[in-house]
Amino acid sequence: MSRCVKQSKELLHLPAYQLEYEEELNDSKSLGLVFRHKKSGARICVVSNEDENKVFTIGFRTPPKNSTGVAHIIEHTVLCGSKEFPAKDPFIELAKGSLNTFLNAMTYSDKTIYPVASCNEKDFQNLIHVYMDAVFHPNIYYRREIFEQEGWHYELEDLNSELKYNGIVYSEMKGAFSSPEQQLFRAIQASLFPDTPYGVESGGDPDYVPDLSYEEFLEFHKKFYHPSNSYIYLYGDMDVEEKLNWLDEAYLSNYDILKVDSEIPMQKAFDGPKKIVSLYPLSDSENEVDNTYLSYNAVIGSSIDTTQCMAFQILEAALLSAPGAPLKQALIDAGIGKDILSSYENEILQPTFTIIAKNANEEQLEKFLSVITSTLEAIVKDGLNEKSLLAAINNLEFRYREADFGQFPKGLLFGIQMFGSWLYDDTKAFDYMHGNRVFQFLKSKINTGYYEDLIRNYLINNTHVTHMVLKPKKGLTGEREAKLKEKLEQYKNSLSLEEKEAIVASTKHLKEYQEAPSTKEELEKIPLLTIDDIKKDAHPLHNKECSIENLPVLHHEVFTNGIAYIKCMFDLSKVPEELVPYLNLLATVLGYIDTENYSFLELSNEINIHTGGMSAELITFNKKMDPDTYTPVFSMSGKVLYSKIDKLFELIREIVHHSKLGDTKRLFEIIREVKSRIQMRMNSAGHSVAVDRAFSYITQSGYYTEETKGIRYFRFLSTLEQEFESRKEEIVTSLRKLSEIIFTKDGIVISITAEQDGFTQLTKALPGFTDSLSGTLDTSKGKTIKETLKAANFNFPVEKLNEGFMYSGQVQYVARCANFVNAGFKPNGALKVLRTIMSYDYLWNNVRVKGGAYGCMCQFAGLDGSAYMVSYRDPNLTETDETYRKAYEYTEKFTTDERDMTKYIIGTMSSVDTPLTPMMKGSRSLGAYMSGTTMEDINRDRVEILSTTQDEIRMMAPIVREIYKADNLCVIGNEEKIKKNEQMFHEIKALF
């Protein structure tokens, strides 16, 4: 346990606090302490343990009363300068020059939280200080420009220009409302909670954001951002006494207890179900038939009942989200929609359970509801499948015990989970930290009628229910934009000359404010680490080449707490080019279709009962400094306890050899579902889609990615769906042929991340699996890994297309890509520093701050020379592209002082030295091995980063220029905006 806390809680000297209760948190080897600050009433929760990745969060209950997005706008604005840290953007200054492992803020339906994390004690304290000052003493009271920049403002360039709205939150929410799924989930919550804060949009509805006045904005902050309404969370290995006494002395002691009315009221249950019909926009190229969303939505108890919340997560998996789950399958078999989605949302006081039929029609609503009711009634009568419940519990339990949240600190996720009970009941801070005992209870309730009673009470007989119909309407985006344009035009015409001149002056003033940098004195008030605070050594690589019966194995030996992470990677060099589009379809089908010994529901249950999850996926390894060489592999992966490694291989063997690829009914269901999920991704992550598409103009590897995962793959699936009846035999034949080509013993390499005990178990289990594979292996001499997994030899028709893809959204994703190795340049660690500079200075200031886009990303140091710039939820197009064009000039003339250069280097090292989970250590090591990256390369890169100078950044200007000069442009954007700028593209086309 951390420092002194475990040994002697009573020795803590905390006169300013009252210890309200404590709990042993055995699941996470922690001690939980809940305090109340005596003078201010602030709540403090400490989770003390030995985790070096420390987390601090301050949160507030912030229930909104309308959909102007005031809570969200405040979240953005308080991080734009404060009393002690008056620089215009301390958040970005920290991102540039901190070793943080997490730095952000989030607005929820009823709370706003400000979490930070770091492994460095000095850095952690700096982050806490800046965030505490930000929330309690923000500059929003003195700089109205912050509200206008982050929230909304009128924009009028001159008296003859068109009057517009702009603002970062305004643009962000226009992007969020461009996704029909996002619109649906917002409409569902509003329908279920018409009388509480959950019935309005805390993030801000773009139609209502401009209704928010500056005065109302300030009033919201005054009311809710008081210590009496605060929830402070500390996690990890730290001096608890020092931290709490500092919080008291620096901030909390300055406040007296205040009664803050922030309680979340309970929505009264309805007398019966309500039907809601709403519209979402569809592009002209899409068909309104088969494009309606139907949803059944129910309110389920209270999130304070953590056991019931966990039970409903299990029910959601057993009924709907697991492959072959009975309610999902019943809806598919009834022909209602092409994809069935579900969610259980328990991050609010009254959790909700939702079932959605996507790509349906309005007239199917009654049948949709009837199938749900009849299926649930039959399940209640006959009883839930015991194995399905056990599988769902085991899967959740495995993930809970593993506590692997990838790049996110586990303390961060623990804290967010805790808010699910603590926010609504001061005595229940730790209820979500005792999962193991809940899992035991829920296992004991299988076959007792417990789960069936939950279904009967909350899903069949519940009256607090809505039935949502979200219908498409072509041209709705255009209608809304025309209406907005007319509204603004009428407003402009109603203004006097003096009032118009005032808006022109305000527009000019805001731009001048945005362009004026913070003073040196302001910037120097933000605490900064030194280069000496950076760890001396890079994360090591863990690669040991081994052989098991002449089969090549790569062992990544790290501590994994008894879990093995295994990849069976198969060579794809013999796959014919015409079958490449089928590769990802095969990866989706395997494990998602019946096998000879299991239905796909039974198979899913076996996987979740015995493993922590299995997947088939395509992985591409790009070769260092060689854009034209890449190694694609087909991976069958799983994570499993050492004692179950043999079971993992048994299941892989079943999937690889005995899947019923001739089941055309199931294949058709999978094709429709996969197409639906990709379409959702294209709506929500247009920046990634645009970048991938632009890279397909440049390299074979980029084209391969597009062919198997991008827009090209989406269109391939669309064609298969449309022509399924005439092509189903071709599809079956192609999948079978791929299986025969791929799954051979002379084309397999195993990657295992585990301790030696795990490797020993692998040596016992692997031969039985490989013996079942076709092909032969030279038993006199085993092949090496790189002899087995060969570089691709496809010859795709790579060409520059420069496309503008039109969709019904209101924002753009603007991408430009290049390959600097192809242009004759060499990588250097300084390029990683350049990325920090461009991300948080040039692009941030021009695309986000001035342009109003929600985000902007860039890459200059791709392993194979890949480089890009891309915007996210961007109201602009030509303006952003012009920013890209001028990036070269900025880099060529880059000027900074020693302090700022240190800041950029530290910020870069923050991403380089991100703590790694065991699985991430294995994946990183595997990627390095396959690309040809050595520790020598990593250490050289590190030295180059740490020694980067202003002159070296300037020397990178030709690489930045290449991104624009190469002229590889892809934009996903608003139909009208794309057409208006058609001269930018070789071709414009519909995204869907």
Image: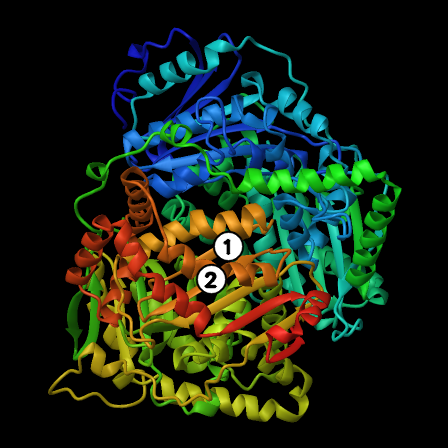
Q: Quadrant of residue 140?
A: top right
> For the point 42% across and 85% down, which residue is it?
739
Point out residue 867 in the picture as x, y percentages from the top left corner. Answer: 39, 66
> Element type at marker 2?
strand
The residue identified by callout 1 is 856
Q: Quadrant of residue 257?
A: top right
Q: Which mark is residue 869?
A: 2
Q: Nearer the viewer, residue 435 or 819?
A: 819
- CA separation in Å, label 2 and label 1: 7 Å
> Element type at marker 1?
strand
> For the point 64% across and 63% down, which residue is it?
326
Amino acid on which disc 1 is placed: Cys
Q: Is residue 23 above or below residue 116?
A: above
Q: Quadrant of the N terminus?
A: top left
Point out residue 952 in the picture as x, y percentages from the top left corner. Answer: 26, 56
Q: Nearer the viewer, residue 669 or 57?
A: 57
Q: Is residue 897 above or below residue 924?
A: above
Amino acid on which disc 2 is placed: Met
The answer to whether mark 2 and mark 1 are in CB contact below 8 A is: yes
Q: Which mark is residue 254?
A: none
